[in-house]
Image (tube, helix red, strand yellow):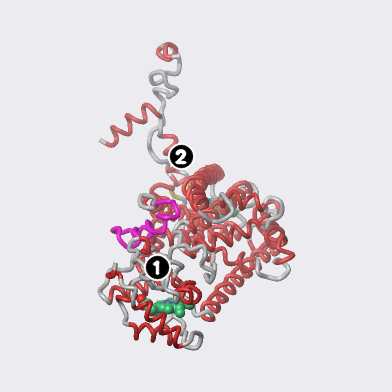
Amino acid sequence: MAQHSNDSKEKVVYVGDSRVKKSGRRPNIPPDYSAFPGKSEAFVPNFLLKEWMVGVVVLVGFLVLVVSHPAPLGYPADPNNTSFIPMPDWYFLFLYQFLKMPYVSGDYVVLGTVGVPLIMFGALLCAPFLDRGPERRFYKRPIASTLMFLAIISCVYLTYVAWDHYQDQLEEMGIVPEHIQREQEARRAAERGESPQKPGGAEEKQIAIVDANDPITSVIQANCLACHGSDYQGNGPVPALAGVGDKFSKEELADIVTNGRGQMPAFGDRLSAEEIDQIAEWLAKQKAATE
Amino acid sequence: MFKAIYNWIDERLDITPMWRDVADHEVPEHVNPAHHFSAFVYCFGGLTFFITVIQILSGMFLTMYYVPDIINAYASVDYLQHKVAFGAIVRGMHHWGASLVIVMMFLHTLRVFFTGAYKHPREMNWVVGMLIFFVMLGLGFTGYLLPWDNKAYFATQVGIQIAESVPYIGPFIAELLRGGDIVGAQTLTRFFAIHVFFLPGALLALLAVHFIMIRRQGISGPL
Ligand code: HEM
């Protein structure tokens, strides 16, 4: 190959043993756009600069959003949490809500998960082969445009219903979404001058349980540990019971258990005064220092 | 100086035709927002690409801190969000960018639909576009699990349950995504691999095809 290309009698001369021609390369100058119809211009740099200006407007709006709204983060995943309301990201809500409708759920779920989506997305995928007329303006394609408008309206509606239902559910169950709760918690901790609570901090500072075999622990296990964690070490936003003796006196503990506090339910009418007294006594013994 | 370097490269690789082809293809008046304000709708494709680039860059920085296992995933995201300098900004860009890219892609799709730009001879590009659409939704679904908080966990659980209800292949899909019977350690590593390697690879390949077709066919003419 190389020998051939180096032969100067050949018409085409290549660069070394490559396939790139030595001469007759194209000059690096843009063409003149005066020959094009209308006010055409070159992509680089003329048009790209204008598109970049639109991009900058979007970028500034985007960055304002990013700086003013930190990305949410809740509490670590706990597969045993039974009260969490599952929520997909907003652009899946329409599908999620759609699947809750009668006729596409329960016995008919196949219609919901395969039938309707397959037809809808299938039609969208094959739009060029379904809508084959030469007309491009949307008002000259009434069927295609109407179907698209209906699809958009349904999606917006379903998304709205899903979101509305979620808000109602939160209110009904008195739940604050975890990422908001967590931010509040961190803010309160900061106000109290503590360093923000470590996420999933249970592993880091396990405080041992005092008198773990006291008979009253069976009452505590039955009533309290669903929230306070099976190992007394707390669970997400619910504080640990291990070590509460350092924070509260026996009287204060009896008061919290009897009357509740914040999200903590009152047990005054569910447990006898004697039980509460024993619980408070036991909790008061839970001091990290006694080890 | 630059000219000398350019010539040195051009002499060896003859890059002028490629570069001039990209740079010089004419942009007609009817898609230029400087001439017709309403032509901003033609910018949505470019803006989608712009946000996609932001996603790829911010995602690359996120993986410097993110650890895809169930013990450390949440802690690494939390650390990034609260301790790392500008970590909240990088994570915020990736989080909000994920929504914005869907919005932009949606607007771009509507522009193409309502200007009838998917018609002959651009049918194939529409189909490629729809495939990009599905890949993007897949990226959204798999990325949602990665912070490994309750929201992530339970949304994924429900999502996979929905997939499982598909007759015949459903249980197979669910098993493939979950890597077991429950959403757990296997699921997280799978979703991480899908989110970071498989789908972006597919996306870049599809985008290349999308752009080559646009370059070849030119933008659709005025209405
Ligand atoms: C990551 C996602 C996407 C990117 C970055 C992208 C980018 C682009 C760009 C830059 C253009 C040039 C015209 C314009 O800016 O409007 C274009 C045209 C086009 N896009 Fe996309 N696109 C994406 C997704 C889609 C989707 C989801 C569809 C539809 C299903 C689609 C269908 C088309 C078609 C048919 C054209 C040719 C339009 C014409 O010639 O007027 N694209 N795309």
Please report, as a chain letter, where disc 2 is located: B
Q: Residue at x 38, y 77 (%)?
A: A282
Which quarter of the picture shows residue A166?
bottom right
Give coordinates of residue B156: x percent, y percent: 54, 59
B122 or B27: nearer the viewer: B122
- Foreground label between 1 and 2: 1
Label 2 Cα crowd, 10 Å radius (few <14 / some 14-19 / many 20+): few
Sort mark 1 into few (<14), some (14-19) or many (20+) by Cα contacts within 10 Å.
Answer: many
Range drawn in magenta? B67-90
Q: Which residue shows up at 71% across the image and 66% down it? A: A104
- Residue A127 percent location from the top left of the image: 67, 54
What is the number of the mark on residue B21? Answer: 2
Judged from the image, the secondary structure of the residue bearing numbered disc 1 is loop
Is A190 within the magenta? no
Looking at the rendering, in which quadrant would you find the C terminus of chain B?
bottom right
| Distance between the alpha carbons at the discs numbered 1 and 2 | 66 Å
Point 40% across, 41% down: residue: A30
* Residue type beneath disc 1: Gln
Which residue does the numbered mark 1 point to in the structure image? Answer: A233
- Specify the quadrant that holds the N terminus of chain B: top left
Q: Which mark identifies residue B4?
A: none
Kindly identify the amino acid type of the residue bearing the numbered disc 2. Answer: Asp
Q: Chain of mark 1?
A: A
Q: Choose top left, top right, bottom left or bottom right for residue A281.
A: bottom left
Residue A252 visible in the picture: yes
> Above or below — where is A121 with respect to A3?
below
Give the camera-side residue of A150 and B60.
B60
Left or right: where does residue A141 sit relative to residue A252? right
Quarter of the image for residue A91 reads bottom right
